Amino acid sequence: MKLVVALIQPHKLPDVKQALFDADIHKMTVSNAVGAGEQKGYEEAYRGVIHTINLLKKVKIEIAVNDDFVEPTVEAIIKGARTGNIGDGKVFVLDLPDSIRIRTGERGSAAIG
Amino acid sequence: MKLVVALIQPHKLPDVKQALFDADIHKMTVSNAVGAGEQKGYEEAYRGVIHTINLLKKVKIEIAVNDDFVEPTVEAIIKGARTGNIGDGKVFVLDLPDSIRIRTGERGSAAIG
Amino acid sequence: MKLVVALIQPHKLPDVKQALFDADIHKMTVSNAVGAGEQKGYEEAYRGVIHTINLLKKVKIEIAVNDDFVEPTVEAIIKGARTGNIGDGKVFVLDLPDSIRIRTGERGSAAIG
Amino acid sequence: MFIKRWTGRLILLMAVVACMSSLAHAQATADEAMFVVNNTWMMVATFLVFIMHLGFACLESGLVQAKNTVNILFKNIMIVAIGLLTYAIIGFNLMYPGEFNGWLGLGGDKVLTTAADAAGTLIGYADGNYTYWTDFLFQGMFAATGATIVSGAVAGRIKLPSFLVFTVVFVGFVYPWVGSWKWGGGWLDQMGFYDFAGSTLVHSVGGWGALAGALLLGPRLGKYYGNEVRALPGSNMPLATIGVFLLWMGWFGFNGGSVLSADPGPVSFTLVTTCLAAAAGIVASYMTSQIVQKKPDLSMALNGALAGLVGITAGADSVSVMSAVIIGLVAGVLVVLAVITIDSKLKIDDPVGAISVHLVCGMWGTLAVGIFSADHSVVTQLIGIAAYGVVTFISALVIFSVIKAVMGLRVSADEEQKGLDIGEHGMEAYSGFQILTTD
Amino acid sequence: MFIKRWTGRLILLMAVVACMSSLAHAQATADEAMFVVNNTWMMVATFLVFIMHLGFACLESGLVQAKNTVNILFKNIMIVAIGLLTYAIIGFNLMYPGEFNGWLGLGGDKVLTTAADAAGTLIGYADGNYTYWTDFLFQGMFAATGATIVSGAVAGRIKLPSFLVFTVVFVGFVYPWVGSWKWGGGWLDQMGFYDFAGSTLVHSVGGWGALAGALLLGPRLGKYYGNEVRALPGSNMPLATIGVFLLWMGWFGFNGGSVLSADPGPVSFTLVTTCLAAAAGIVASYMTSQIVQKKPDLSMALNGALAGLVGITAGADSVSVMSAVIIGLVAGVLVVLAVITIDSKLKIDDPVGAISVHLVCGMWGTLAVGIFSADHSVVTQLIGIAAYGVVTFISALVIFSVIKAVMGLRVSADEEQKGLDIGEHGMEAYSGFQILTTD
Amino acid sequence: MFIKRWTGRLILLMAVVACMSSLAHAQATADEAMFVVNNTWMMVATFLVFIMHLGFACLESGLVQAKNTVNILFKNIMIVAIGLLTYAIIGFNLMYPGEFNGWLGLGGDKVLTTAADAAGTLIGYADGNYTYWTDFLFQGMFAATGATIVSGAVAGRIKLPSFLVFTVVFVGFVYPWVGSWKWGGGWLDQMGFYDFAGSTLVHSVGGWGALAGALLLGPRLGKYYGNEVRALPGSNMPLATIGVFLLWMGWFGFNGGSVLSADPGPVSFTLVTTCLAAAAGIVASYMTSQIVQKKPDLSMALNGALAGLVGITAGADSVSVMSAVIIGLVAGVLVVLAVITIDSKLKIDDPVGAISVHLVCGMWGTLAVGIFSADHSVVTQLIGIAAYGVVTFISALVIFSVIKAVMGLRVSADEEQKGLDIGEHGMEAYSGFQILTTD
Ligand SMILES: Nc1ncnc2c1ncn2[C@@H]1O[C@H](COP(=O)(O)OP(=O)(O)O)[C@@H](O)[C@H]1O
Ligand SMILES: Nc1ncnc2c1ncn2[C@@H]1O[C@H](COP(=O)(O)OP(=O)(O)O)[C@@H](O)[C@H]1O
Ligand SMILES: Nc1ncnc2c1ncn2[C@@H]1O[C@H](COP(=O)(O)OP(=O)(O)O)[C@@H](O)[C@H]1O
């Protein structure tokens, strides 16, 4: 199993969700983060002090999937999040040796879905 | 070493913390997230527009443990979080090749505890 | 590739960012969390009820790097975050089998930087 | 507006022909001016009492958890509406009856059906102090406060419709009925019981209702964990602070308006005692909180201000300035100890401290009149306190019990955990804000 | 009005008997006292209308998304400034011209250049009801409200400079020009059209501007997704609630002050109709929201209060108390249905419901005067409503179109997604707070 | 209330009997009416000045970081309490002494021990303008503002007890002592120095205290990083905006009340100059901010409103309307440049811009009286500005230094990083809200 972690532009979340649902991936965990990447920050000025915000608002999506689901998941994310502009974000794929459904205690692949 | 990641119902956090302490696991990192799973969302209506919230509030707990601690940790989480209802959540277990304590620079198992 | 996850004191973030930039690591994702570790909590009193806050505010930094970058990254984090006091935090290093740049679809090491 | 000036001139022209005895008129003009200023003052006082409802809304929504904020705000806006309407339909007549046996009466003009230019708008209605309309509105704004006090104590677990039904009955019947005993010229008034602006008639009455509600509902989930008492911290302290300042502001009208005329001496004196009691309440609660809790708790200082205000309300016009300060100091100490005792010892869950502020300090203030004012007796004051306590508390218990039996009082555990905002209203107070309650 | 006429006659007596005795002094003092209290009341009313601007600022910033909060606050503070200045430079004279053909006029003293001790400060200026300065300030505070109404409807997508230019023209010319038709004693006034405090002259006028703006701008991104209507929930409900309470507070001055004197009867009666209509609006919108939306929506109850207030504004002094309640009830139902229709059926994106509250209920209130007051005709009221509708809507469309052509109206999609706070102001409203909009 | 009506009737009866020389009676009644309306106005002005304290609380808590919010709120509520009490005990007598050498005096009745029905409540106390009690309360509300100004500048790093001690001394002694030089009829007054409502006596005095505090404390950690200046953005802009609107509202009483009677001409004129100066301040600061910062900063526009208000305070009654606008415009430009200079050039850390608003614009406003009013001389104004500057600044420095030596002034670095809310109060302002300061 793998844990797919994606960092995307906040306003692309609805599209990514849509793309994932279409690819019939319905389980995910979403949280917010700020990130620095190629996308350069913007300047804020507060009371005359200019400060560059180089940590930009991003949305983090975590999806645990069985190995054969990795590609569809990644593709769905790309489909929903890509604009071709810097800042589109990244997808990281981690190994997921085990997974447990708290409700039933099921383990492994059974617990993913 | 392993990194145990649990996603639970927010209001179960106190119980899970208790269960972990009882199992004498005192170190953890907690953050909030919203998630979609089997648990179907609920409807909100704002100014006449009904919109389904299918990303529900969840709490994320991350615990880095030595391998022999994985089972007790998972059991403690299940003990604290389980209600038997849909939405109880998931536990994901990731490999953790290395861990460093910033204060001392210790590495590996020594740094976990 | 590896995913370096660091949990540090919130007010050390600027220093850590600086140290990372100096080590020429410019890409990262930052989020907030609360954590329990060796550092004992403090007491809050609200309307006469004393309650111990043992989940303390922390900042979480995630950095995906190529293997040869792991050490410099960890060192930079330590450099920026260490005070020698309890609560300095931890660094966890996870395996990162794959990584994708959404914008280009590049994969692996190419997508990291 | 143009038209207005025009007619103005026309009227004057006609007046030339109309006029007669000049002395009487010169006289009348001066009295007339006095009538206008008195009425203007009473209207201003009405506005100030109105703003107290915003004060309560802010205080209560600041002290509850984020997930219950919409619900408490909704309650507060509904209370004003229900309060004014029921008071117009029944309360006003019940509280200030024409013919009255001293116990229970109903008479006088009906607000809804009185004509705009009725006798009530003439200088004669209240010796040139205000009109019938000003009278009604000022009293009506007062009335609703009773129910607002209750809403804070039952926050976070009561069903919305159940609370609204309670409000209708409490504001429509209980408050005006018991109120008539004193302000309607009833038996307690004849007995010499004194409560200038309502330490007992408004605040204790509300406080007793709050106590009844809190008892019948029981504590919020997670508040008491076995023997351990948990804090469920308020989610928005600036909001709570705004609330207290606005309440203080409102008290200028609450006490100052209770002089029922703009008479400079009594009104301005009342404002001074009111402010100094509030100031003393803050200082005393700060000290007490510092000593008992080690660190000064903002919510206690806020409660301290209200404690002083509630405490001075019964005697604002009749105790000396020095006594006012003492009353405030005592109230400030009392409120902190009361909050802690009720919360941790008696294990009654009162999220905003309504019982401590309004009931405890309301009783103290009423008693203080007997202690610090030569013209009033401690005994009569105690009789009044007791009478109101017994009757109001029982009434509230009965109303709540009936509601509980008929429509239920408390939301489901699941709804309570998710929060009443989503459960009762299907919306969030701070949409998009990430909120994480770690314990 | 009765008492007022009385005073009128008395004032005249002075002239009659003055030549003889020290009576003159006595009476003069009495008239003087009346002048002072009238003026004091009008100043208080001015303060209350001023606070409405804070009310709008809170309501609007509470109902927009967090990322557009600074922008809406900025607009609201600018509107007060621009409103007062343009009204001083041009608006006041345009609205209340000296010599006037009934359609368009400009005359009278210029505010900026009038001396402090001009005749306007004397008792003669407005039959001893207020001074020239009070007159200007009261009217000036009124003027700015029109533009504020618009700002809510165009929130989240309009360019700041473009909006400010609109404000200058709208408050500087359109509002006073059309206002003069009635309050300046123009053609509609001569025709017998009645609008006591501005259901049409202020609220509909603002509402038409809001409609024009919302139409030309189109909806916020993500509001309509194909056929699906998305909710973009307000980010701070306590703030919105504060706004509504403050607006209600302000209405005491808005309606009460429109009596243009402290005359006890009419003023206090007006306050009662105003409050009961607001209360009725809340109850009705709650019921409607409960039925239509299943769960009671706080933002609807808040709009309901405003609906009642806007509805009663045209006839607050001339309908019966019972009628006031009915007007409020109808307005409360109307506003909920209007919000839903405009948002989901007509697909016009009005983030704060300005069109429903001010335009729809403004028209209803103006019409209601014809229905509930014997002295006014439905037909004339309809003519007035139509006249203001056509002229204001077209004017607003033209102004916005010109601005659109010259400097553009809408921010870039990218800026809109990041939020106007960062795009237009380079700052955040809730710095440090973690905000995550999940859909 | 019952009792009241009774006495009312008695008075009427007596009136009837006494009505032989209805002339005398009419006369008396008329003056009486004037007394009542004057006093009513002064009480309203007092309420408005009171609400300024809420204004400061909102502005300051909106502009500090979330982690220091409870602390600033706590300070603001304590200041009102301490201010009123110390002013009652000592300040009032110190500022308005009976016999007075012009430099330092103490006399007159003691507030705490004066009886309710003392001569001070009679028409004679202040020529029928207000009572002794109104006088005290109005002045007392003024007094506390001085200390509030300081609290903003020292926010985020000062120890709570240390600040409170400073407040007691500053409000109890320094403010009334220097105030007496002008308003007590002291040497500066005799010299012809003019400061209508306190550009210097209140705002500069507070501003000098703020400067002294900010200098002695040094900047907040992380504000200056080597040569780099860091922004520590305010955490709640809606709150800050509410603050400014409330302060503006309060200024109606601050300036309008300083006429010390309800005299229609001067009071209404004062309100007009006050409002237009504020409006001009907003526009000017917007322009300046747009030019200097490229994007319009809301916090600058807010400061601009206050700048205009502070600027006009010294001459609100004595400059022309046009001059008022100019004064406001200049103040608006000044404040933006001052904020930037003080923050980035002088590297003095003033989280809310108190020094720029109150000190800089206070001096400008005082000077402006000399420039724009024929009756006053630039030289005398400069002498006054200098005298207050030297004495207040030194006094504040001394007080702070003594406190620093005795009990320490600044919290520990660790506490500062965690935030004063947890350090000093053990509680959070926005419990549960996720707050992440990324730099
Ligand atoms: N090496 C990395 N480690 C951790 N997070 C990263 C890394 N690279 C990118 N990110 C995250 O992805 C977001 C987008 O990265 P960016 O480089 O701006 O996008 P793009 O690659 O499309 O130009 C960043 O804001 C950051 O949150
Ligand atoms: N495959 C997954 N990937 C990521 N997060 C998941 C996954 N499955 C579940 N979760 C998280 O766990 C939470 C609970 O899942 P859910 O299926 O509702 O619980 P249960 O399995 O007990 O029915 C979800 O809200 C989501 O945050
Ligand atoms: N085993 C662990 N699993 C997860 N998070 C941990 C673990 N140990 C420490 N942390 C995180 O690191 C933070 C600092 O740990 P702590 O032990 O207080 O620091 P130190 O090791 O320097 O004393 C904790 O608050 C927690 O968020």
Image (tube, coloured by chain):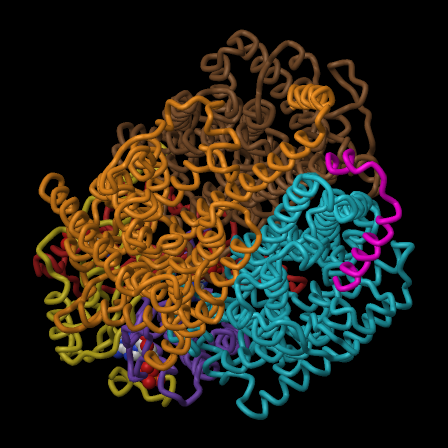
Chain colours: A purple, B red, C yellow, D brown, E cyan, F orange
Q: Quadrant of the N terminus of chain F?
A: top right
The quadrant holding residue C75 is bottom left
The boundaries of the magenta stretch are D1-28
Is residue F299 visible from the viewing direction of this image?
yes
Say whether residue D15 is magenta. yes
Taking the image in four quarters, ligand 1 sits in the one at bottom left
Compared with E168, D227 (above or below) is above
Which residue is rendered at x = 44% and y = 87% of the image? A83
As rendered, which of E100 and C80 lies closer to the eye?
Answer: E100
As rendered, which of C53 and F168 lies closer to the eye?
Answer: F168
Q: Main secondary structure of the magenta part?
A: helix
The quadrant holding residue D82 is top right
Which residue is rendered at x = 69% and y = 31% of the image? D403
Q: Residue C63, percent across and down?
A: 24, 73
Q: Is residue F92 left or right of residue E201?
A: left
As rendered, which of B68 and E115 lies closer to the eye?
Answer: E115
Is residue A62 visible from the viewing direction of this image?
no
Say whether residue E342 is magenta. no
